């Protein structure tokens, strides 16, 4: 009897291994006829310290973005010092696992050291000098990963909410053609790489209009733009599915692809006055801003699953123009939304929980691909 049950248990393990090896095993397989499914790798993933996370990444994703490893402050901390250690490992991981590798990001107003915009005396750089600095950086970084990084977020978040260009140091010192220049330099660095303009809140009509105008201008100038990236740092009830749908349609009309680049869903009370993804936004911690520190109520868990299903329904509808849907992080415990815009909250924005277990939202997203409606 004891022996029989041991044999039965061994058989069960064997069978489950065989099934796991054969069955479509993850998100990427469920969506293989529609678009790539990506995630953002943090330092622990890149250095292999999070073995559980790495296994989930290999099983579920065929595209990767670097959460921080390729930002200017990470790879180019000082004028004459580049540090490619983490970035090299990130790219090696993607190549070894045959993944679509994203470079994030070349020109941005955040996580860019102050020295970039200053001369040796701390005075603002001239337009020409800043352009040269931008060109050197972009050539060096894009050139290093030529043929391995498949697509670059060339310019990130260049617009204000009202659709005017953000008065960043890039804009103030160089002027609005800094965007054109950044795309040209990136193209010179790797003529075959895809080049993206990446942004949040394009569901807001004024901001969307600004970006549409920019892409039109770039195209008229003969600048190669492969796709607009919609970050989609979303909430449970904003933006509406109709707004997401209209945003994708409007951008697709420009003849560019539309990628979803940083998807996550905040389930906690909004702490800033308006909806934003500006990483320097800060709000004070208050107990009512952190209601689920001891666990997520089932009702909210279900709401999150439904919300994810709704969004993926819209993405699937647009599968002809969407090449990739990438999440901003892997498991809930990894998410930047635990510390932004309020430090030390407990958020639940992704498809895997703090133990790395797939959540109901995971099943909901898989079911959308299988054409099965999720229960309300
Ligand atoms: C965030 C990272 O997730 C954090 O770890 C970091 O501290 C700040 O930046 N829009 C972007 C991303 O384009 O680069 C930001 O990532 C999130 C908002």
Image: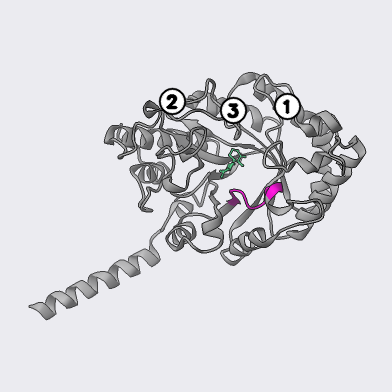
Q: Residue at x 54, y 28 (%)?
A: 245
Residue position for label 3? 201
Residue at point 88%, 45% (across, down)? 132
**Mark 1 beta carbon near ligand 1 (under 8 Å):** no
For marks 3 and 2, the one nearer the N-term is 3
| Residue at x-position 36% and y-position 53% | 355
- Up the image or down, 4 lies above or below 196; here it is below
Specify whether residue 70 is painted magenta.
yes
Which numbered disc, 1 or 3, marks the residue that appears first in the sequence?
1
Res 172 seen here:
yes
* Residue picked out by circle 2: 237
**Residues at marks 1 and 3, CA–CA distance in whole angstroms:** 14 Å
The percent position of residue 13, horizontal first and vertical second, equals: 27, 70
Can residue 204 be found in the magenta stretch? no
| Rendered position, 292 above or below 86 | above
Q: Quadrant of the N terminus?
A: bottom left
Ligand 1 in which quarter: top right
How many residues crowd around disc 1 within 10 Å: few (fewer than 14), some, or many (20 or more)? some
Relative to 304, is 198 on the left or the right? right
Q: Which residue is mark 1?
A: 166
Q: Which residues are magenta?
A: 65-73
């Amino acid at each position: 009897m004891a022996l029989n049950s041991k044999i039965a248990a061994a058989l069960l393990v064997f069978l489950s291994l065989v099934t796991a090896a054969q069955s479509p095993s993850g998100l990427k397989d469920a969506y293989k006829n529609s678009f790539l499914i990506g995630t953002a790798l943090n330092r622990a993933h890149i250095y292999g310290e999070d073995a559980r996370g790495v296994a989930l990444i290999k099983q579920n994703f065929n595209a990767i973005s670097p959460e921080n490893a390729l930002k200017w402050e990470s790879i180019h901390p000082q004028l004459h010092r580049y540090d490619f250690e983490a970035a090299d490992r990130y790219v090696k991981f993607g190549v070894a696992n045959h993944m679509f590798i994203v470079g994030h990001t070349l020109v941005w107003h955040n996580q860019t050291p102050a020295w970039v915009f200053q001369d040796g005396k701390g005075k603002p750089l001239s337009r020409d000098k800043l352009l040269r600095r931008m060109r050197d950086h972009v050539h060096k970084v894009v050139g290093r990963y030529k043929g391995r990084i498949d697509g670059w977020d060339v310019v990130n978040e260049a617009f204000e909410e009202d659709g005017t260009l953000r008065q960043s140091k890039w804009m103030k010192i160089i002027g609005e053609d800094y965007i054109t220049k950044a795309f040209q330099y990136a193209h010179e660095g790797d003529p075959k790489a895809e080049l993206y303009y990446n942004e949040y809140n394009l569901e807001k009509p004024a901001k969307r209009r600004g970006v549409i105008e920019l892409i039109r201008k770039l195209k008229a100038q003969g600048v190669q733009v492969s796709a607009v990236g919609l970050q989609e740092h979303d909430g449970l009830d904003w933006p509406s599915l109709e707004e997401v749908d209209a945003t994708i349609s409007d951008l697709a009309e420009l003849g560019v692809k539309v990628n979803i680049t940083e998807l996550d869903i905040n389930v906690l009370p909004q702490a800033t006055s308006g909806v934003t993804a500006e990483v320097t936004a800060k709000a004070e911690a208050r107990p009512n801003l952190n209601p689920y520190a001891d666990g997520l109520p089932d009702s909210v868990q279900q709401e999150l699953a439904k919300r994810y299903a709704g969004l993926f329904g819209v993405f699937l509808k647009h599968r002809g123009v969407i090449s990739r849907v990438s999440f901003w992080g892997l498991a809930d415990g990894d998410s930047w939304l635990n510390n932004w815009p309020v430090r030390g909250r407990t958020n639940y924005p992704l498809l895997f929980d703090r133990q790395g277990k797939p959540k109901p939202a995971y099943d909901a997203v898989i079911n959308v691909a299988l054409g099965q409606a999720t229960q309300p």
